Amino acid sequence: MISGTRWVHDERAARRYDLRLHMAIPGLTSSIGGCASTPHGGGFAVPRLIHRLVFALIVTVSIAAPASAQNGTNAALQDDSGAIRWDDGSFRAGDAVRLDPHMRFQTDMLLRDPAGPVDDRFDWPRRRIGVDGELFSRVEFQIERELEDETPWRDVYGDVKFTKALRVRVGRFKVPFSTEQTTSGFDLDFLERPAAVEALSPSRDLGVMVHGRPGRFKYEVGMFHHSDGYTSPSDGGVTLPSEGRLGLMAGRVAFTPIRDDKDGFTRDLELGAAVTRSTVPEGLHGVVGHSVDGDRFFEHMYVKGARTRLGVNGLWSARRFTVKGELLQSTDERQEQSITGDDLSNLITRGAYVTGIWRAYGKHGRKKASVDIEARFDRLSFGSANQADEPFTNPRADHVAPLSQRTLTFGATWTVNRWIRVQGNAIREQLVDPLGVRDLAPAAPWTALARLQFGL
Amino acid sequence: MTAKRFRLSLVTAATIALAAFAFARPASAQTTDDLFNGAVLQSIQVTMHSRDWDTLRANFTSNDFYPADVTWNGLRVRNVGVRSRGLGSRSGIKPGLELNFARYSSRSEFLGLKALVLDNLTTDPSMIRERVAMELMRRVGIPASREAHAQLYVNGQYVGLYAVVEPVDSVFVARTLGDSNGALFEYHWLQPFYATYLGDNLDTYRPLFEARSQQTKSTFELYDPIRELFRTINDASADAFRDAVTTFLDLDSTLRLIATESFLAEWDGVLGYAGMNNFYLYRDAATGQSRMLPWDADHAMFGAEYPLLAGASENVLMRRSLEDPALRQQYFAFVTQAMQSAASGDWLAREIAAEAQQIRDSAWADPTKPYSNEEFDAAIAELTVFAQKRFAFVAKQIDANR
């Protein structure tokens, strides 16, 4: 895009560059209109709101660029480093522009399947290319695309830094809720996220978010276009509840009283809380439960109304040990969903996990060679506010028969170098039906998986 | 209070309690005999979300279940799974329904039943063929589903006249055969099949015979005996045929079923016009012997002069059975028994007349049936003629073929 030219920091050039940036992602606006988790696939017209968001992104970058370009000009004049160069995996144009192209691949191998012999042991869960970078020390951005996927665009956003305590992000990115969900799929401690996180966390969405790190706090507050993947009528989607509009509000705050303390027993300590609120249209949109092999063990329930998620998280690390975990809850209203059209009691889905990590080899820091030994216990449970009547499993049951999934995972992660990582996991999951209304299969034996991850 | 007044109070209280018990008992003591009591035109109310009912009718080819409450005779069963059912009778206007009481809780049941079938009667303008046929089968000792007619109301609206049919499941085989530890299979018509040997591949038999119990058993455990049954039917020598087949199949009960269906001119049964159809196979766990159980006799009484041995020459099992002198005699003896049972006290004609009389008003008022009221009356008239002429025709056929 900018190779072969000597790039000069001036206002006109900065604006031209911004223009090129947005021209370089043709079709982006139409592609990101469909949320990754939307149950309503298929093409539809580019909604007006998406245009507004993209326009806001362009305007934000354009406003930020000239001011920074002015500063950048001074910097360039001072150190004469305005030439385009390749530096440690990044294209740099002076100190004003940094572009980090990347491609990352994961291949999984199923080592042991309790269901029996398998025809295809290999899987490619993630194959992504993208670029992220920084412009004028003021605007960060990321564009990432999955290869061969129905919804290829992943993160596509710009992030403007006004101060350390005030940043604005616009585009398509992960909704701030679970810390595990917002961790990149290439940086996970295990091959898969905990079932509770997968089931209860919102995914990527189009939106705008204000965030920052004032002192020892970190906050993220955003509004998003889609409501957990459900598209609005203007997108050709579902019919809205008469009393509300689709959309999702999310906020997360974290407090870090101790951070990277090399002298004390506790190196890191972080405590956080999160909340989201959205409106879910009428239909079979309740939270589902998936087992390790992808089969559903808990089906969608009829819901209509508000969905409220609450979460708390904690992380504590000392020397070579790290312990972290989250408690998550989702509450769904079920207005007019009984067989007679009356309201049903709220659906309540709760989840939690706790992870312990021991760094057996290597120093603190992800990019260095290391070996981690990990263990995790996670639990996901389904039920309803009504726990008094006779329980049933049907999607309109007032007392939803409770069911919980308990998963124990042991793993090891060998980070060979900054590009290659090898992981192995042994997983055992168990379904527990405390009231005995289901005919459950006996607990499955261990499933074993291995992953080779390669990234540039 | 004097002792006399106290005793009087006690007697009064006891009388009231007894009276209350007497009035309460009919509701609490109802059984499946009451539900399948053919002397009564039953009434069933189904309450379900109007959107679910619309979806069920719109997607009537789907087997998706929807939750509903079901009320019969003052008994209300909550959270019942309801789905569209049937093969050729599937309808979005008048859906055949399965009521599955255990769908949403393995602890749930209704009068001891795990499920109930509401036959939409769309393939039979008379709306009584199946019930009459099953009634006769039970009279001659064949384990057959109990049936009664019922008016079906969904969300308070009269949907139409249905037949309440006892499903063939583990509860049924336990009731009729006294054992439910065996393997139950539902035969599915996929293509004309005349009891020929289909080869060694067990996967060939699996779609024809869907396991309705013991689904967790291996394919070999479930289907090897079925493969060997048809191998034996086709490959056994003439001399060894009876003993060899008896290892796998209860020939006595099988011939009795075929004989009764033949008397009833069942056009779509074991010797159906397009191959075997409408039966279940139950394999006893102790003996390994299978037996056929009848199902869906809505094409019975096809015609008074429907040949007694129609389909017999095409079906390998029947053809080879008739080639065995003893089995041939046995078969005609069973036909004679069925005929005598139907003729006894003019049972067949009276049963047809009684059922027709019982359902006529409801049938005429049925807003979703796919035929006119005149066609209903004409079909009843045809059955009346069948009851008049079938006996003489079958007697002639027996004499000619015995």
Image (cartoon, helix red, strand yellow):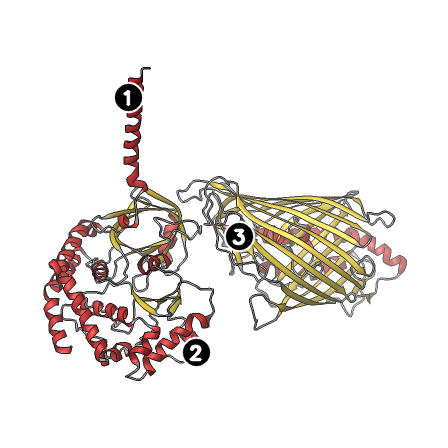
In front: label 1 or label 3: 1
In front: label 3 or label 2: 2
At which x and y percent is residue B387? Answer: 12, 63
Chain of the residue where label 1 is placed in the rendered structure? B
State whether residue B218 is above or below residue B359: below
Looking at the rendered structure, the secondary structure element under dot 2 is: loop
At which x and y percent is residue B314? Answer: 26, 79
Q: Which residue is mark 3?
A: A231
Using residue A358 as the reference point, say whether residue B237 is left or right of it: left
Looking at the rendered structure, the secondary structure element under dot 1 is: helix
At which x and y percent is residue B206? Answer: 41, 71
Q: Which residue is mark 2?
A: B201
Q: At x 28% / y 28%, what residue is drawn?
A: B15
Residues at circles 1 and 3 in contact by the CB criterion of under 8 Å: no
Q: Which residue is mark 1?
A: B8
Chain of the residue where label 3 is placed in the rendered structure? A
Residue A54 is at least partly visible in this image: yes
Using residue B45 as the reference point, say whether residue A67 is left or right of it: right
Amino acid type at circle 3 is: Thr
At which x and y percent is residue A263? Answer: 88, 48
Question: Dot 3: few (<14), some (14–19), or many (≥20) neighbours within 10 Å?
Answer: many
Q: Which disc is residue A212 wearing?
A: none
Using residue B343 as the reference point, say whether residue B24 is left or right of it: right
State whether residue A193 is above or below residue B301: above
